Image (tube, rainbow, N blue to C red):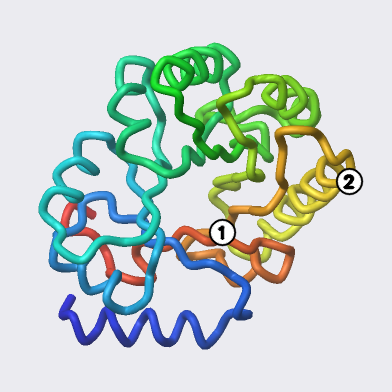
Amino acid sequence: MTAEEIRKKIKDIRSSLPAEVIVEAAVKGRLVQEIETAIESGIDIIGENYVQEALIHKQAIKKKASRWHFIGRLQKNKINKAILLFDMIETLSSWDLAVALNERLKRTRKRIDVLVEVNIARESQKNGVFPEETETFVKKLSLLGNIQVKGLMTMGPNLEKEEMRPYFRNMRQIFERIRKLSLEGVKMEYLSMGMSSSFKVAVEEGANLVRLGRAIFGPRPDY
């Protein structure tokens, strides 16, 4: 896809969404030039699935985004690199990983923002805490001094967009319930849900952060 096409897609997406909704570019498998065009077009969050790919992108891209988020499955042996590369981990759903992350952050005297990943449809092939476990998990995370919970994230089931609406609605209910608890160490700012095929429905149901790959860049070459 040409730079002009990417710029037009971003402009069209932004014009179709409320101003408060943040658009994050999911850049798995994308070219450096494509990512630079997205940044130049006003995308200020870059979402990376792989630590190594993020390292390559950050070294090669001249015009830097203001924020880099990790949206993949973080492995413990990649924590040290991740806390140097990213401003937020969007996929935290394991207590063991949370403890390991917090301990590494303590050693470096750093703090990192996280979103809790929720497996809203209880799918066996996907990561995430189950809906009924989310509040308890957030409460536990609030006790870890070097991790700041900033909200929730879900992938959602692979359904037609209208069929996903009740799942997104349930996520909003969980989000609001936890927000009203006013937990110390927790700032429920972001409800991240909706991707290229479903982001408009997700926003209608309360998402204020959407992760878009294909909608911005078109299909990846490996598809």
Report the amino acid beneath label 2: Lys
Relative side of 89 to 161, left or right: left
Which quarter of the picture shows residue 128? top right
Alpha carbon separation for disc pair 2 and 1: 23 Å
**Disc number for residue 194:** 1
Residue 162 versus residue 220: which sits nearer the camera? 220
Report the amino acid beneath label 1: Gly
Of the 4 image quadrants, the one containing the C terminus is: bottom left
Query: First in sequence: mark 2 or mark 1?
Result: 2
Q: Circle 2 is placed at which residue position?
A: 180
- Residue that sits furthest to the front in the current view: 109
Relative side of 207 to 65, left or right: right
Q: Is residue 33 above or below residue 26?
A: below
Residue 163 versus residue 37: which sits nearer the camera? 37
Give the image location of residue 141, x and y in percent.
Answer: 67, 24
Give the image location of residue 8, x and y in percent.
Answer: 32, 87
Relative side of 162 to 92, left or right: right
Q: Residue at x 42, y 63 (%)?
A: 212
Estimate how packed mark 2 is, as few (under 14), some (14 to 19) or many (20 or more) residues with alpha carbons within 10 Å: few
Q: Residue at x 21, y 86 (%)?
A: 4
Give the image location of residue 89, x and y in percent.
Answer: 47, 38
State the SS at label 2: loop
Q: Is residue 172 above or below residue 111?
A: below
Which quarter of the picture shows residue 10? bottom left
**Disc number for residue 80:** none
